[in-house]
């Protein structure tokens, strides 16, 4: 089943047309899914279901409500998209919509469309002068995670941005919207010293303020690369994952 279509059907079923109307826990309860919170050592969420009912367990050590919300939406995705199964979802499974495991990828796409439909993104998010400020306010409004909102805005937002997640000094994934001048950052690419994110993996404190950088820092391999092209870079450390979320937009 197509995860995007299924998420849209669910919103329509419960006549939800605005972020303020969406209560993911109420949807779970209405679909005969019991929610509980327990201490999970190696997973953020899990689900046991038989296709009719199920039990979703969320790691009670998750502090951020938005992260709990996305985790819950992800597990609901498994319920609707898979046959009778058990799923144990690690922290890393929630970091990208291009996960190598197709079932986790589809559950993330479902959660994204359920919590952040494209039409809502375009209607309710106005880009400000700072990437983190814009996306953080949006993630609060939609009650989801900053990283999932950054990916979603890069997919369908109206302002030209790119987002990149780096782990252990290498690019894990990148996403740029159609308005951004560059597209290609190969997964596995080592971070360039021109990027502020580089210093994080050297054990240094990094600035979380926007800074001007050259496109060389990220896009040397892009077909449209331009020398002496400046852009804004803002880096958000994610210490729990040994990762940095980078937001890029035109200067």
Image (cartoon, rainbow, N blue to C red):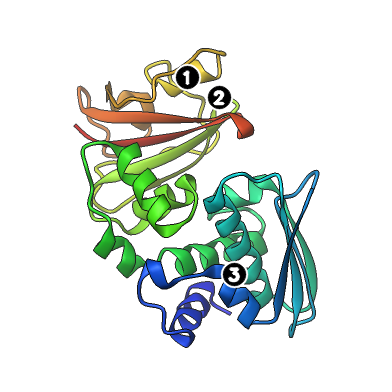
Q: Which residue is mark 3?
A: 25
Q: Residues within 10 Å of mark 2 (few under 14, many from 20)?
A: many
Q: Which mark is residue 169?
A: 2
Residue 220 showing in the rendered view: no
Upstream in sequence: badge 3 or badge 2: 3
Residue 103, above or below 133: below
Disc 3 element: helix
Say whether disc 1 or disc 3 marks the residue closer to the N-terminus: 3
Quarter that holds the C terminus: top left
Q: Are marks 1 and 2 in contact (CB under 8 Å)?
A: yes
Give the residue drawn at x 70%, y 51%: 44
Q: Where residue 244 sits: x, y (%)?
A: 50, 31
Secondary structure found at label 2: loop
**Residue in the image at 54% along x and 29% along y:** 170
The numbered mark, 1 or 2, whose residue comes first in the sequence reads 2
Relative side of 165 to 150, left or right: right
- Disc 3 and disc 2: Cα gap in Å? 37 Å
Tags 1 and 3 touching, CB below 8 Å: no
- How many residues crowd mark 3 within 10 Å: few (<14), some (14–19), many (20+)? some
Residue that label 1 marks: 198
Inter-mark Cα distance, 1 to 3: 39 Å
x, y percentage for residue 207? Answer: 39, 20
For disc 1, the neighbor class at 10 Å (few under 14, some 14 to 19, many from 20) is: many
Query: To which quarter of the image does residue 221 belong?
Result: top left
């Amino acid at each position: 089943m197509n995860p995007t279509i299924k998420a849209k059907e669910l919103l329509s079923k419960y006549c939800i047309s605005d972020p303020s109307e969406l209560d993911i826990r109420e949807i779970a309860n209405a679909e005969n899914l019991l929610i509980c919170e327990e201490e999970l050592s190696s997973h953020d969420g899990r689900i046991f279901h038989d296709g009719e009912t199920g039990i979703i367990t969320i790691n009670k050590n998750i502090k951020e409500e938005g992260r709990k919300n996305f985790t819950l939406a992800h597990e609901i995705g498994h319920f609707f998209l898979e046959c009778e199964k058990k799923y144990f979802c690690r922290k890393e499974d929630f970091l990208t919509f291009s996960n190598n495991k197709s079932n986790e990828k589809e559950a993330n796409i479902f959660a994204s469309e359920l919590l952040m439909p494209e039409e809502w993104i375009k209607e309710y998010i106005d880009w400000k002068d700072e990437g983190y400020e814009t996306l953080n306010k949006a993630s609060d409004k939609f009650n989801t995670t900053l990283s999932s909102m950054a990916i979603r805005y890069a997919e369908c937002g109206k302002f030209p941005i790119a987002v990149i997640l780096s782990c252990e000094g290498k690019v894990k994934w990148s996403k740029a919207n159609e308005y951004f001048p560059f597209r290609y950052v190969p997964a596995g690419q080592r971070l360039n010293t021109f990027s502020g994110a580089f210093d994080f993996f050297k054990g240094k404190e990094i600035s979380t303020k926007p800074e001007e950088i050259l496109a060389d820092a990220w896009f040397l391999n892009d077909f449209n690369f331009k020398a002496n092209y400046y852009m804004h870079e803002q880096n958000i450390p994610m210490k729990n994952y040994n990762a940095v979320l980078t937001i890029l937009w035109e200067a």
